[in-house]
Amino acid sequence: MEAHESLSIVGLIWEASFIVQLVMLLLFAASVTSWWVIYLKVKGYKQANEEADRFEDQFWSGGDLRDIYEALQNRRVPRQGMEHIFEAGYREYARQVRLGVVPGQVVEAAQRVMRVALSREIDELETRLSFLATVGSTSPYVGLFGTVVGIMNSFRALGQVQQATLSMVAPGIAEALIATAIGLLAAIPAVVAYNRFANQVERLELRYDNFKEEFAALIHRQASASHAKGKGQSAGASA
């Protein structure tokens, strides 16, 4: 009964050497933190997709672009995702039109601003993904380090006795393997989550980029129409 209790997981962790306990604590903290990051990213990507769906429905409903822009300006919450890209692009478009810039340059200026806004949104979406990648790539090696230390301690203890038995070496080997197991438990969810989130970021980036191009084509048509109308009014006035 005592041997069974001494080989329990809690008992092995409690009786492990300081270095092995430190490794286990580090891996446990990394695992808890990575699960918190996973929760935040799942929530954030879900919200980003929902906001994109809602804004696209509003954008393609046939309403006036200025009305959409003013509605965004009247909201007190910060704009994110597709709304941010639209807001930045339309603001620059309106500024260029007021300056009387030719349509081609209007669209070029608006696209530059939207590219910057898109880049910022992607940076925000990728926040903390590097932490998951680090946990996924390093945790097995950290756990392996704890395993090596535990095995070294076991063999060191064997060298101090005349007759070695399995019961003497088993606890040290077991505690060493626990460090490896904790490392894998920390790494596997982080790797799976990172790959899934990287794919979601790529899909959102493609979605934002497609919207940017469609919006640029739309404001190019509007800028061309406004420019032609202005030239027609000028010709009529001069006549």
Image (cartoon, rainbow, N blue to C red):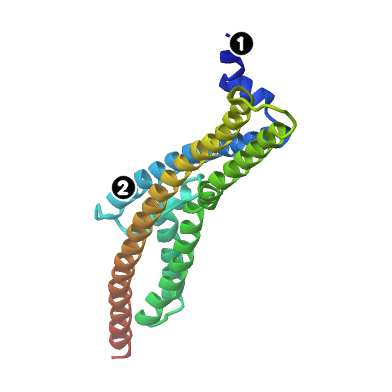
Residue 221 is situated, as x and y percent measured from the top left of the image, at 27, 73
Q: CA distance from mark 1 to mark 2?
A: 61 Å
> Does 11 appear above or below 79?
above
Q: Quadrant of residue 31?
A: top right
Amino acid at circle 1: Glu
Which quarter of the figure has residue 210? Answer: bottom left
Query: Which of labels 1 and 2 is toward the front?
Result: 1
Q: Is residue 118 left or right of residue 4?
A: left
Q: How many marks?
A: 2
Vertical relation: 108 (above or below) 58: below
Which of 61 and 231 lies nearest the eye of the viewer? Answer: 61
Q: Is residue 2 left or right of residue 41?
A: right
Q: Is residue 119 left or right of residue 2?
A: left
Asked whether, in this view, residue 95 is left or right of residue 220, the answer is right
The quadrant of the image that shows the N terminus is top right
Residue at the farthest bottom position: 239
Residue at the location (63% across, 30% down)?
A: 172
Looking at the rendered structure, the kind of residue marked 2 is Asp
Residue 2: give its label.
1
Secondary structure at badge 1 equals helix
Identify the element where label 2 is drawn. helix
Position of residue 208 relative to residue 99, above or below, is above
Q: Is residue 56 above or below residue 31?
A: below
Outermost residue, front side: 162
> Which residue occupies 29% across, 88% down?
235
Q: Position of residue 178 (x, y in %)?
A: 56, 32
Residue most extreme to the right: 160
Residue 38 lies, in percent from the top left, at 48, 40
The residue that label 2 is drawn on is 53
Residue 139 in percent (x, y) is at 56, 44
Q: What residue is rendered at 52% in x and 38% in y?
A: 186
The residue nearer to you, when weighing 6 against 138, is: 6
